[in-house]
Image: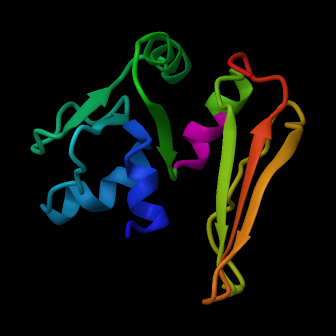
């Protein structure tokens, strides 16, 4: 029996990551977690290369890169972390879905999940699922995305 997470990894072949999400891994000297058949793209204008052969640094415009990636044949693309990266991709209308795992913990402070944007992003609920540990998954379709 496979877990929801294992099933999820089988649906994607690319992970998009912002520099601030990747920096702690880069500084630790440990490799970025890799999954068979999944390419890892880190968006940065300051990092020139990665010691990890499973990571490709992308310095071009993120939205244009994602548009090119979406035109290629393949599985889904997953964006992990990166409020600034998410903001630029939302504003370019290239994000099709938003999937959030809500944990039953209030930290009181921290990094905002979404940064201020120039436009409202309307979404339609596609799925909600609660787990025994109190975590809730919500998955939304982004209305008006270029791929929707």
134 over 83 or under it: above or below: below
Q: Residue furthest front?
A: 1
Q: Is residue 82 visible?
A: yes
Q: Position of residue 68 (x, y in %)?
A: 46, 11
Of residues 72 and 52, the one nearer the viewer is: 72
Which residue is drawn at the image coordinates 37% and 29% (left, top)?
A: 45
Residue appearing at x 40%, y 14% in the figure: 73
The reply, left or right, for residue 8 in relation to residue 84 is left
Q: State the scheme by which the image is colored.
A: rainbow
> Left of 40 or right of it: where is 95?
right
Of residue 27 and residue 72, the one placed in the foreground of this image is 72
Q: What's the residue at 53%, 14% (across, down)?
A: 67
Eyeballing the image, is 9 above or below 65? below
Say above or below: 71 vs 113: above
Residue 84, magenta (yes or no): yes
Q: Which residues are magenta?
A: 82-87
Q: Position of residue 2 (x, y in %)?
A: 38, 66
Q: Tag count in the figure? A: 0
Q: Residue at x 87, y 31 (%)?
A: 119
Is residue 29 left or right of 76 when viewed as pictured?
left
Is 20 colored magenta in this rendering?
A: no
Work out which quarter of the rendered image holds the C terminus and state it.
top right
Figure quadrant of the N terminus = bottom left
Q: Is residue 15 visible?
A: no
Coordinates of residue 31 in the picture (x, y in percent): 15, 56
Would you say the magenta stretch is mainly helix, strand or loop? helix
Q: Using the rendered view, name the quadrant where residue 89 is placed.
A: top right
- Where 74 falls versus 134 (above or below)? above
């Amino acid at each position: 029996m496979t877990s929801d997470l294992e099933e999820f990894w089988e649906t994607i072949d690319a992970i998009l990551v912002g520099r601030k999400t990747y920096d702690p891994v880069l500084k630790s000297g440990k490799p970025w977690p890799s999954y068979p058949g999944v390419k890892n793209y880190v968006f940065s204008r300051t990092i020139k290369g990665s010691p990890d052969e499973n990571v490709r640094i992308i310095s071009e415009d993120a939205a244009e890169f994602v548009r090119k990636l979406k035109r290629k044949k393949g599985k889904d693309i997953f964006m992990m972390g990166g409020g600034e990266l998410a903001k630029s991709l939302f504003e370019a209308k290239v994000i099709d879905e938003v999937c959030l795992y809500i944990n039953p913990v209030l930290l009181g402070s921290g990094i905002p999940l979404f940064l201020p944007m120039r436009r409202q992003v309307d979404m339609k609920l596609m799925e909600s699922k609660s787990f025994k540990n109190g975590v809730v998954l919500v998955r939304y379709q982004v209305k008006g995305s270029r791929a929707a």
